Amino acid sequence: MHKYLALIRANWQRALTYRSTILGYRVGEIAEMLFILVLWTSVYSASGENVLRGFTLREMITYFLIGNLFNMVVRSFASERIANDIKHGRLSTYLVRPISYLAANFMRQFASLATLISVITQLILITLFFLPVIIFNTDALYLGIIALMAIFAFVIEFMISYLVGLIAFWTDETDGISSSIDRIKRIFSGGLFPISFLPEVFAQISFLLPFGYSLFVPAQLYLKKMDISTGLYGIFVQAVWIVILYGIIAFVWKRGLKRYESVGI
């Protein structure tokens, strides 16, 4: 266990050394979120409607604030790091260590939560701007379900990113695949607009995929537009996806490792 704790400490310190990079991300994210919120405010104003597809303006603003906060906490950038380890031969140093490469990278991902302070700061700044219209949920049961969903979403996001990184066993670049998955996720997670705005068939597909549980569902739970039973079903779906992704990762790792060793890197 101590070797995993050492990895967390080392990567926590590494994350903190890139404060300027983190700040750059946050400034861009704040600008993007403010633009989305101002855009939706303009949409409601131009339509003259108080409710659009079941959302009041206050609910829409809260939806994007809570949903994007949730998404920022759980998202993963592991694919680029793993792909570079494979392409540049750094994976070899891990193969001779008494530690799982999957576990080591999960610890590295966990250490990235050092940026959570900047995420909270970002949310506070935006919340102060929209404070008069934000809806607050203090229901412990709903918040508990959302927290559990966040843990599962964190694991799923990491596993998807890890799997994309393993593609580097066969190709030099993974950026294109990673970018495509991010765009698909943005649509099916409800990052552009609530999933309920999509045709029913797309909404049903989203609830079968893990993406909707990284933004839309937790935001809906926060607004109490979904009940506890729906939240528990979502957690069940997430658990199933964790098992599926682990099986795929194990298969791809085994096949990829044979190729890695055969080329003598």
Image: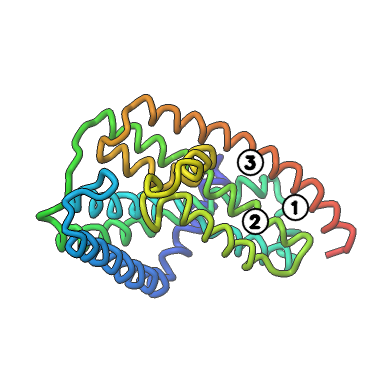
Nearer-N-terminus badge (3/2): 2
**Label disc, if present, on residue 245 of the rendered structure:** 3
Where's residue 44, x and y in %? 20, 59
The image position of residue 109, as x and y in percent, is 51, 53
> Residue 166, located in which quarter of the rendered image?
bottom right
Q: Is residue 202 left or right of residue 178?
A: left
Viewer-proximal residue among 35 and 71 = 35
**Circle 1 residues within 10 Å: few <14, some 14–19, many ≥20:** few
Q: Which residue was labeled with disc 1?
A: 95
- In the rendered structure, which amino acid carries the disc numbered 2? Val
Q: From mark 3 to mark 2, how far is it between C-alphas?
A: 11 Å
Left or right, 141 with reference to 133: right
Q: CA distance from mark 3 to mark 1?
A: 22 Å
Q: Is residue 10 left or right of residue 142?
A: right
Q: Residue furthest top?
A: 229
Residue lying farthest to the front in this orientation: 48
Whole-percent x, y for residue 69 in the image: 33, 53
Q: Which residue type does callout 3 highlight?
A: Leu
Closer to the observer: label 1 or label 2?
2
Name the outermost residue toward the right: 262
Taking depth in this image into account, of 103 and 34 the one nearest to the observer is 34
7 relative to 203, above or below: below
Residue occupying the point 51% across, 35% down: 238
